[in-house]
Image (cartoon, coloured by chain):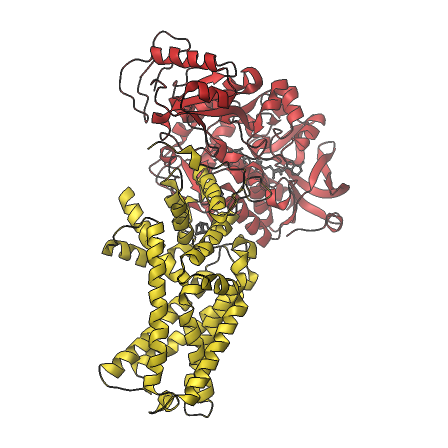
Amino acid sequence: MTDDLNRLSATRWDVVVVGGGNAALCAAIEVAETGASVLMLEGAPETYRGGNSRHTRNFRCKHDAPLSVLTDAYEEDEFFDDLMRVTKGKTDEHLARLAIRKSEEALPWMEAHGVRFQPSLSGTLSLGRTNAFFLGGGKALVNAYYNTAADLGVRVVYEAQVRHVGIEGRRFTHVEVEKDGVTHRIEGRAIVLAAGGFQGDIDWLARAWGESARNFLIRGTPYNKGVVLRDMLDQGAESVGDPTQCHAVAIDGRAPKYDGGIVTRLDCVPFSVVVNRDGDRFYDEGEDVWPKRYAIWGRLVAAQPEQVAYSIIDSRSIDLFMPSVYPPESADTIDGLAQKLGLPGAKLRETVERFNAACTDGSFSPQELDGLATTGIEPAKTNWARPIAEPPFYGYVLRPGVTFTYLGLRVDETARVTGPEGRYDNIWTAGEMMAGSILGQGYLAGFGMTIGTVFGRIAGQEAAAHVA
Amino acid sequence: MSLDVTLQTDPESFGADATDEARRQVEICNACRYCEGYCSVFPAITRQKVFASGDITQLANLCHNCRGCYYACQYTEPHEFALNLPRALAEVRTESWDRLAWPGGLSETFQKSGVALAGALVAGFALMFFAISALPSGGEGFYAHLGHTAMVAIFAPAFLLPLAAMGVSLTRYWREVGGTRVTWADLREAGASAGRLRNLSGGQGQGCNFEEGDRYTDRRRQMHQLVLYGFLLCFASTSSGTIMHYVFGMEAPYAWYALPKLLGVPGGVMLTVGALGLAWLRTKADPELGAPDVKGGQMGFVLLLAFVGLSGLVLYAATGTAAVPLLLALHLGSVLALFLLIPYSKMAHGFYRFAALVREAQIARAAS
Ligand SMILES: Cc1cc2nc3c(=O)[nH]c(=O)nc-3n(C[C@H](O)[C@H](O)[C@H](O)COP(=O)(O)OP(=O)(O)OC[C@H]3O[C@@H](n4cnc5c(N)ncnc54)[C@H](O)[C@@H]3O)c2cc1C
Ligand code: SF4
Ligand code: SF4
């Protein structure tokens, strides 16, 4: 239900929820189920509600036996080991294990609140044991939660941008929220902050990462600009996560600046040679299977001049990966392709010829690490090193695409935020805004939604208990 | 096979015609695949990388317009990809029916225009009034007003000619989508899907998105099932009557417990309720997720079905009263209009959908 803020600001709400993605919705539903009044302030218009959650496809879930669409078992220790591997130990073990353990009961809760699951999508069979896929994807999940929330009486206001969280000592008192250029003051007895990261604010990214971040693409919503995060940090809330870092993957360089989502992914790199603007190779394209490498390629491309790179394959490889959403450039000669891509032709030809000469005989096997490696060139290509020789040749442009930022608010196991005077009495946070506690580095597919669901629910339960 | 890039589309440049536009959207879906669990269309998409026009025609006719993939899509307007796959496929679908209809021209009129359908209905009434007053009668019941011979003289061609025209269209369809020889297994598979309207089930039986926007409901499937099975019962009723007449020499009117009545009365009720239900649901659904051009024609068609069912029931209820000639003319006139318009109205969708399901069964089997 959408409502006029003027009227709504006359009420003192039990719980105000800031944000409109997965974490916010889980919190709002938990509160509303206790009968407390909930006002949800979503900064985006209704058509774009749901933040980055609308771009997701699955969540990672512990289970000791087959559960819903999940096969076999995925136990706590294996899950935690997977997390340790990607974060290189940068995680709060206590919170991480909490998220992992609670993911198992989250799945039936999600189903009971309208989410539907499906077996893993074609092309992602490797995730069928660990990740439960949402029927229709994240936007269907978000829609289901909005409907459930509406049925429970949650009031939602769209295009309601929270600018400031009013705090007196350790107590939250009100929020200042802007809609249609007018600022309203809304009072509440407790607040849950679930407004995502700051990757939508390019200036902030550029300050944190460096000017080159202006050439990054943002894979998700433009509405996560970190306004609430900034406001909390300015008021002395404790932070976690590296403030300079973001998770960036290599995506199609032609993607829209924002909200390109899943379709802009490119899976051609392992079967290609990748060159920079000058036509030089710069990294081992065949180091590992793509799902394990697409994240480091975000950083690799970010380090190249103009933050751009070009992945070049020949006709033998075009059917080896999921289709791209943008058609590749193609030409019958490397020179012709260079021209279409705006690369120096002679240089590209030389790079490809040197690469081809360094390829060795052996069997090429796209589905596994085949050990087919180059000899005598730097950098080497250590798997799938097959000459780029059979026209037509195809080229894709790569750019870094930011998924999320790591900086967030520190929380305890009750999702409560800590300020300069200790734990706040009535401020909780969930989702991307606190994920840096658990995901200090790297990313584990599907864990963002796990963190959001588990801590969103905890935050909601705690806030509800506070106002009960 | 290597990718023919000339066939792949720039996702941000909208198609010049319905097929190009659907192709653009289908390619985006193929890179996304989130909607894979809703219906048969997405698994069919993922089997290919590029899509010839015939492939798009096939996908369009396979789509049941359940709308799940619209509400679940993160790329709907105002996103620059502007996805609205239910509409894009609906536009290809209705255009394909115009193109494939034989003879040409009629489909454009009757698919689009509810007024034209109403005109056809009035013409049907007029013809039947004329037949009842001018042609010889003889017999009991209805035959007292319009003789059996006259009835057959009108309805046999009115039924068989449209079917023949439909046959021409389906042959054209089959050629366009590259269909191969049909086997029993294909028919069984398609029949199972059509019989349960699997593609309106939302993939898990929760139903589709129609009258309640992004909430799933199964009402549309239920109403459609009433229409489908109600229509089939009515059809079976007429067929049983024909067989009783010719094979067993048992002539109408039949008692309430005779087969034609036992099939026809529940069939008529189901058809009427289902068609009115569909019409009501239509008033609540978002017209932007279908082909807006044919909105009037589709509503007109659903109401025509309801009229056929209702007039049949009323006619039966009025047995023996003075209203029979009038009601008979109205009922038979509507049946006549319905039959004659089979290849040129929404009625054609059943035939094309079934053909698409058969073709899908073939492709799925070849791929597995
Ligand atoms: C393309 C893509 C694919 C992904 N796929 C997956 C996946 O498959 N599985 C997975 O687990 N994770 C995935 N992630 C990560 C996942 O999206 C996040 O971890 C998760 O959505 C975070 O949920 P959230 O509720 O914290 O934030 P969000 O869903 O981003 O919600 C933040 C909300 O806050 C609102 N907001 C922001 N600022 C304000 C303000 N000032 N006032 C009011 N409202 C405000 C926003 O409009 C938005 O509604 C993906 C991310 C991207 C970009
Ligand atoms: S309709 Fe949208 S969400 Fe569904 S598969 Fe297509 S692009 Fe993806
Ligand atoms: S509208 Fe329904 S049937 Fe048609 S493609 Fe979308 S999900 Fe499939």
The answer to which of B281 and B351 lies nearer the viewer is B351
Q: Colour of chain A?
A: red
> In the image, is A118 to the left or to the right of A18?
left
- Which percent across, then down, holds residue A446? 46, 33
Residue shown at 36%/32% (left/top)?
A: A126
Depicted A282 relative to depicted A228: above or below: above
Indicate the quadrant where residue A121 lies. top left
Q: Colour of chain B?
A: yellow
- Which percent across, then down, holds residue A345? 47, 15
Depicted B324 relative to depicted A346: above or below: below
The answer to which of B111 and A7 lies nearer the viewer is B111
The answer to which of A76 and B236 lies nearer the viewer is B236
Residue shown at 22%/83% (left/top)?
A: B248
Depicted A295 relative to depicted B294: above or below: above
Indicate the quadrant where residue B189 lies. bottom left
> In the image, is A112 to the left or to the right of A226?
left
> In the image, is A460 to the left or to the right of B368?
right
